[in-house]
Amino acid sequence: MAKVQPGRYTAALDDDIVLFLIGMRFNRPWKVWQWWSVFTAMPRMLRQLTTVPEIGLLHVQNGMLSGQPLVVCYFRSPEHLYRFAKDPELTHLEPWRRFNRKIRDSGDVGIWHETYRIGPATTETVYGNMPPWLLGAAVGTELAGKRGNSAEKRAGLTETDEPVVAPY
């Protein structure tokens, strides 16, 4: 288990990276034969991503969102992510093709992903009394005060730690 860092920290994000969220939804959970191959393909992909640093994965965390599986991934660049998705020598492309041939239009299982380019000028984080977590685990952490004591300062909305008040 990662060690808790007492105090307030922020992600030490100095360059643009990619946040990739991916998940599935069991639309018809009783049809295990339909969604099982989708469900079991992800651990093989994650194993490859975490053991071959050249692929470009910085960090991965698994969880649940509304009772459905969710995987949060941070990649070095969009090129790294898309190369992983399309390279026939890697573990993603064949399961994706199999899904599209077998069950894409069945409605039995849903899959989704969202991709975001994030960078130091557009990202704000704070971790209070936490181990390195999510983005902080991907790029490292530093004391929050180094980038600003307010969320507005860390997000690049103001030059000072004075709060920004938005009009209603």
Image (cartoon, grey):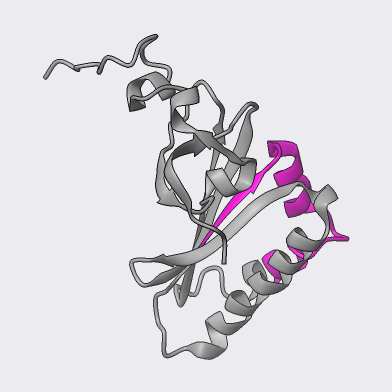
Which of the 4 image quarters holds residue 17? top right
Which of the 4 image quarters holds residue 166? top left
Taking the image as drawn, is residue 97 in sight? no
Would you say 150 lies left or right of 116 here?
A: left
Of 95 and 47, the residue lying toward us: 47
Taking the image as drawn, is residue 110 in sight? yes
**Figure quadrant of the C terminus:** top left
**How many labels were placed on the picture?**
0
Extreme residue toward the left, this view: 168
Tell me, yes or no, whether the highlighted magenta stretch contains residue 76.
Answer: yes
Would you say 140 lies left or right of 47 here?
A: left
The correct choice, above or below, for 56 with respect to 13 in the image is below
**Figure quadrant of the N terminus:** bottom right
* Stretch of the chain drawn in magenta: 70-98
The correct choice, above or below, for 68 with respect to 121 in the image is below
Measured as percent of width and height from the top left, residue 136 is found at: 55, 44
The correct choice, above or below, for 165 with respect to 8 in the image is above
Tell me, yes or no, whether the highlighted magenta stretch contains residue 82.
Answer: yes
Extreme residue toward the right, this view: 89
Which residue corresponds to the image point at 43% horizontal and 31% vertical from the top-left?
124
Which residue corresponds to the image point at 34% horizontal and 22% vertical from the top-left?
152
The correct choice, above or below, for 110 with respect to 135 in the image is below
